[in-house]
Amino acid sequence: LCKEAVREVGAIPEPNAPDEIAGYLEEVFDASEQVNDEFVKLQPPEELRADHERAVELGEESQKTFDGVIERVRAASDPQAALREEFRKLVPELERAQKLNTRLGLEECNEIGPPSEQPAPS
């Protein structure tokens, strides 16, 4: 389910300038949204259904959160500092999603997203 998205994210060129960070994030989060759309369609066994439903909810919440992150980074006078601050706020949400992915046997989904050390323009 997530392997293609991991490949897609890995192929997205990292930003070369601060004003490219928001566009980079849009591409990364679009790949994540595609996985969420497919994930919703899964029919897990009964014992995983509650975790699946919670993961679907988290995915929907995350998409709204990510849209806000992109807008705040785009509007910031220092996009790199804004990105660092936004990701500090996201850590608890990301950790919850990773735990659910692991319980659902979807560890590869934990690899989708910007690197943990956020991209700095090169």
Image (tube, rainbow, N blue to C red):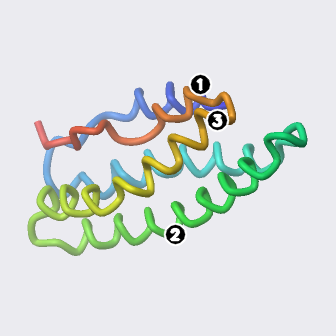
User: Label 1's element?
Assistant: helix
* Residue at (43% x, 47% y) in the render: 95
* Residue at (66% x, 28% y) in the render: 105
Question: Which residue was labeled with disc 3?
Answer: 103
Please state which amino acid type lies under the numbered disc 1: Lys
Nearest-to-viewer mark from 3 and 1: 3
Please state which amino acid type lies under the numbered disc 2: Lys
State the image coordinates of residue 80 (x, y, percent, origin top left): 14, 56
Question: Which residue was labeled with disc 1?
Answer: 3
Q: Residues within 10 Å of mark 2 (few under 14, many from 20)?
A: few
Question: In the rendered view, would you say 48 is above or below 37?
Answer: above
Instruction: Tell me if 35 is positioned left or right of 17 in this view.
Output: right
The quadrant where residue 78 appears: bottom left
Quarter in which the C terminus is drawn: top left
User: Label 3's element?
Assistant: helix
Residue 64, numbered circle: 2
Q: State how many labels appear.
A: 3
